Image (cartoon, rainbow, N blue to C red):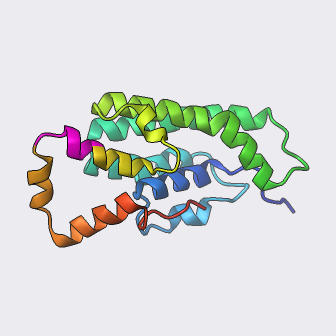
């Protein structure tokens, strides 16, 4: 019998990103496949399209969705190569995640942030790295200061949408990724 590997599989990573982007939705398919040591690698592009590309394209724009999906696809290829050449036998999953976070996830995350910032003409990536401050709060501050018509746009939103945005800003709606 096989045990779960020390490192997360690709679908766990995609699910975590989808949770962070709030694009996972209620589809249980990715939950059923994430974490399995024997998942079908052909599911990677399906998952990427389903919980990353399609919702981001719908909510932000097709170019942004395509860019994030392309970055995620490149990450998955590099991740496959990285973990296939890295023996994590004998270490805990927590320690494996620490190693992967410091040597792989952080560099891909920084590059994705830089690319998104350039493509969306948003705040500089460095602004998102303020210790003790959530990136979403930084983004909303940038909207308020830099986007013409933001106040008018915000003023016409329903109370429900404003409340949701306030929860995002304060971090009360954002879940920790598991």
Q: Position of residue 5 (x, y in %)?
A: 78, 53
Q: Quadrant of residue 39?
A: bottom right
Q: At 74% from the left edge and 38% from the top edge, which residue is drawn?
A: 83
Asked whether the viewer can see residue 5, the reply is no
Q: Residue furthest bottom?
A: 160
Tag count: 0
Considering depth in this image, is 123 or 11 the residue closer to the camera? Answer: 123
Q: Check the image and report above or below for 147 versus 163.
A: above
Asked whether the viewer can see residue 108, the reply is yes
The C terminus lies in which quarter of the figure? Answer: bottom right
Q: Describe residue 17's horizontal placement relative to residue 23 as left or right.
A: right
Q: Describe residue 126's horizontal placement relative to residue 143 as left or right.
A: right
Query: Residue 147 in magenta?
Result: yes
Q: Describe residue 52's horizontal placement relative to residue 101 as left or right.
A: left
Q: Check the image and report above or below for 32 versus 17.
A: below
Q: At 47% from the left edge and 47% from the top edge, which residue is drawn?
A: 48
Q: Position of residue 136 (x, y in %)?
A: 38, 51
Q: Position of residue 167 (x, y in %)?
A: 35, 66
Q: At 45% from the left edge and 51% from the top edge, which residue is drawn?
A: 134
Query: Residue 33 in magenta?
Result: no
The N terminus lies in which quarter of the figure? Answer: bottom right
Q: Quadrant of residue 86?
A: top right
Q: Check the image and report above or below for 122 versus 42.
A: above
Q: Residue furthest right?
A: 90
Start-end of magenta stretch? 142-148
Q: Please name the predominant secondary structure of the magenta segment in the image.
A: helix
Q: Position of residue 8 (x, y in %)?
A: 69, 51
Q: Quadrant of residue 31?
A: bottom right
Q: At 55% from the left edge and 46% from the top edge, which residue is drawn?
A: 44
């Amino acid at each position: 019998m096989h045990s779960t590997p020390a490192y997360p599989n690709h679908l766990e990573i995609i699910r975590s990103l989808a949770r962070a982007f709030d694009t996972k939705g209620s589809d249980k398919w990715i939950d059923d496949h994430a974490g399995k040591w024997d998942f079908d690698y052909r599911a990677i592009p399906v998952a990427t399209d389903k919980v990353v590309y399609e919702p981001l394209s719908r909510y932000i724009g097709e170019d942004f969705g395509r860019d994030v999906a392309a970055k995620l696809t490149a990450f998955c290829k590099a991740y496959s190569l990285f973990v296939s050449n890295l023996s994590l036998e004998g270490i805990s999953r927590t320690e494996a995640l620490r190693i992967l976070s410091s040597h792989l996830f952080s560099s891909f995350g920084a590059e994705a942030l830089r690319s998104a910032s350039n493509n969306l003409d948003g705040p500089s990536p460095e602004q998102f790295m303020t210790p003790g401050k959530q990136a979403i709060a930084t983004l909303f501050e940038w909207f308020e200061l830099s986007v013409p018509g933001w106040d008018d746009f915000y003023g016409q939103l329903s109370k429900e949408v404003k409340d949701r945005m306030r929860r995002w800003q304060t971090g009360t709606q954002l879940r920790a990724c598991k």
